[in-house]
Image (cartoon, rainbow, N blue to C red):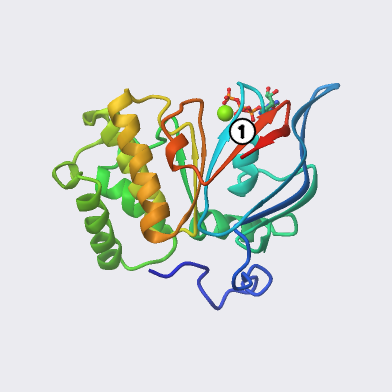
C-alpha cells in the first residue's frame, strides 16, 4: 500500500513529508473560537509528539477539546497559534489547496454520526474519495471490494445507508476512510452511536489497522473500549493536556 500525494502538482514540494517524521508534532497548539465579543478556548497550548504507528486514545470530559484537536489534526480547521506537523507536513503553513489534498490523501476520518451520503450506495460512498483523488474507477472498485470483504460488508455493497444497521454504517465509513490508504486515521467518538458489540468491532478494526498495518490511529472517546489497545493515552481538560500515559 502506498500513501502520500499525487506527484506533479505545484504545491506537492512544500507538503511533501520527510521520511521517518513523527505522525504528530504539535507545539503550543491553540484554538480559540471567537463568538461575537467572547472567546471560547477550544485548545490551549497543547504540546504533543506521537511517533508513527502509534495508537492514541484521547480522553476527557465533554468540552475538553478532543474534537477540536482532531479537527486540527485532520486539516479541517486551523490553529489560532502554535505549530502543527502531521506526518511531517506543516499544516499551519499549508494553503487551502494543500489542506484539501492532505485531507483526501493523508488522513482518514471516522465520525460518531458516520457522515455517509444518503443517496449513494455503500460501494459508491466508499469509492467517492478515490474518484475525487482521480483514481481510475476499476482500481477504486477493486480496492473497495477488498475493504468490503475485510469489513464483512460484501452483501451490503449495493445498499443505501438507510438500509444498514449502525454497525454496518460505521464499517462503511471506515472503508471510506481507508480507500485512499491514509497514513493516519482519526476517529471522533466512533462508537458513540453503536451498541457495545458493534462498538467493540469498530475498535477492534481500528486496532487491527494499527497493529497489522502500522497505521497511526487516534481515537477520541468517552468509552473504555479502546483502553486495552492504547499505546498512548492523552487526557484533556479545558483544552489542556492533564495526563499522558
Ligand atoms: N465551532 C465552535 N464554536 C465555538 N466554540 C466551540 C466550537 N467548537 C468547540 N467549541 C468549544 O470548544 C471547547 C472544546 O470543544 P470540543 O468539541 O473540542 O470538546 P470535546 O472534548 O470534543 O467534547 P465532547 O466530548 O462533548 O465531544 C468547548 O468549550 C466547546 O464549547
Ligand atoms: Mg467531541
Q: Is mark 1 within 8 Å of ligand 1?
A: yes
As drawn, the residue found furthest toward the left would be 155
- The image quadrant of residue 201 is top left
Q: Decide: is 181 above or below 70.
A: below
Residue 191 in the image, given as x and y percentages of width and height: 40, 30
The residue that disc 1 covers is 66
Q: Nearer the viewer, residue 243 or 191?
A: 243
Residue 203 in the image, given as x and y percentages of width and height: 38, 38
Q: Decide: is 50 above or below 166.
A: below
- The image quadrant of residue 36 is top right
The residue drawn where x is 13% and y is 43% is 155
Mark count = 1
The residue drawn where x is 20% and y is 45% is 152
As drawn, the residue found furthest toward the right would be 37
- Residue 114 horizontal side relative to residue 37, left or right: left
The residue drawn where x is 55% and y is 59% is 52
Residue 226 in the image, given as x and y percentages of width and height: 44, 36
Residue 12 in the image, given as x and y percentages of width and height: 61, 72
- Residue 74 horizontal side relative to residue 158, left or right: right
Amino acid at each position: 500500500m502506498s500513501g502520500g500525494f499525487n506527484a506533479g502538482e505545484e504545491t506537492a514540494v512544500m507538503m511533501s513529508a520527510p521520511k521517518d517524521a513523527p505522525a504528530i508534532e504539535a507545539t503550543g497548539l491553540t484554538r480559540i473560537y471567537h463568538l461575537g465579543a467572547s472567546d471560547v478556548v477550544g485548545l490551549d497550548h497543547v504540546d504533543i509528539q506521537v511517533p508513527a504507528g502509534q495508537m492514541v486514545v484521547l480522553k476527557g470530559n465533554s468540552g475538553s477539546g478532543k474534537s477540536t484537536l482532531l479537527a486540527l489534526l485532520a486539516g479541517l480547521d486551523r490553529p489560532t497559534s502554535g505549530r502543527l506537523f502531521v506526518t511531517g507536513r506543516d499544516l499551519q503553513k499549508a494553503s487551502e489547496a494543500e489542506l484539501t489534498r492532505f485531507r483526501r490523501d493523508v488522513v482518514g476520518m471516522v465520525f460518531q454520526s458516520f457522515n455517509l451520503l444518503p443517496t449513494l450506495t455503500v460501494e459508491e460512498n466508499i469509492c467517492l474519495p478515490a474518484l475525487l483523488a482521480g483514481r481510475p474507477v476499476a482500481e477504486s472498485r477493486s480496492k473497495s471490494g477488498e475493504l468490503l470483504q475485510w469489513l464483512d460488508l460484501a452483501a451490503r455493497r449495493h445498499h443505501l445507508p438507510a438500509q444498514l444497521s449502525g454497525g454496518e454504517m460505521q464499517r462503511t465509513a471506515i472503508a471510506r476512510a481507508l480507500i485512499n490508504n491514509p497514513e493516519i486515521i482519526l476517529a471522533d467518538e466512533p462508537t458513540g452511536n453503536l451498541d457495545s458489540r458493534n462498538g467493540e468491532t469498530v475498535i477492534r478494526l481500528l486496532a487491527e489497522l494499527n497493529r497489522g498495518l502500522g497505521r497511526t490511529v487516534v481515537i477520541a472517546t468517552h468509552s473504555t473500549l479502546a483502553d486495552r489497545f492504547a499505546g498512548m493515552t492523552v487526557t484533556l481538560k479545558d483544552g489542556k493536556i492533564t495526563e499522558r500515559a
